[in-house]
Image: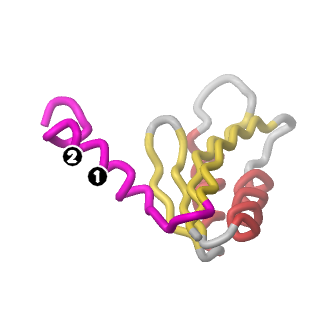
Amino acid sequence: MTVIALLSVAPVREGSMSEEVAKAVAALDDFDVSYETNPMGTVIEADSIDDLFDAVRAAHTAVEADRVSTFLKIDDKRASDESAREKVEAVEEHLGRPARSGE
């Protein structure tokens, strides 16, 4: 089973959040997950929902602030092991091109 999620963790404050976001992303390195960070969040792949929740918990608690906002969207497709890359490739096959603009 592959569980794919979109995670966004950030302190609620004015100014740059990048240092605290970097702490959240770095916390994922302690877990058996793969991830890719983009401007809107981090896509995480884990073998189980438990692995995913453990990693997400660590990312959330790594942010040091009086208030932390965490958004988590989970795709727990239990009947297959389709990776995040395979999902993008399926869309690209229908598009007939990479799923990005400007390339």
Q: Which residue is mark 2?
A: 93
- Residue positioned 78% across, 48% down in the render: 64
Residue visible at 62% across and 46% down? Answer: 7
Please report the bounds of the magenta region as a residue range: 78-103
Spatial CA span between label 2 and label 1: 6 Å
Q: Could you tell me the amino acid type at mark 1?
A: Glu
Q: Mark 2 and mark 1 in contact? Answer it, CB < 8 Å.
A: yes
Q: Is residue 69 left or right of residue 23?
A: right
Q: Which quadrant would residue 84 be assigned to in this image? A: bottom left
Decide if residue 37 is on the left or right side of residue 4: left
Q: Residue furthest front?
A: 79
Residue type highlighted by circle 2? Glu
Residue 4 appears at what percent x and percent y? 56, 56
Q: x%, y% of residue 36? A: 45, 55
Residue 82 on image: x %, y %: 45, 62
Q: Residue at x 63, y 56 (%)?
A: 76
- Identified at 80% across, 41% down, the residue is 65
Q: Nearer the viewer, residue 97 or 54?
A: 97
Which quadrant is home to the N terminus? bottom right
Q: Is residue 27 magenta?
A: no
- Give the colour scheme of this rendering: secondary structure
Q: Which residue is mark 1?
A: 89
Q: Secondary structure at mark 1?
A: helix
Q: Relative to the observer, which residue lies in front, 55 or 3?
A: 3
Up-down relation of residue 71 to residue 42 (above or below): above
**Figure quadrant of the C terminus:** top left
Q: Residues within 10 Å of mark 2 (few under 14, many from 20)?
A: few
In the rendered image, residue 81, in percent from the top left (x then y), is placed at 50, 68
The mark found on residue 56 in the picture is none
Q: Is residue 82 magenta?
A: yes
Q: Give the image quarter of residue 51.
A: bottom right
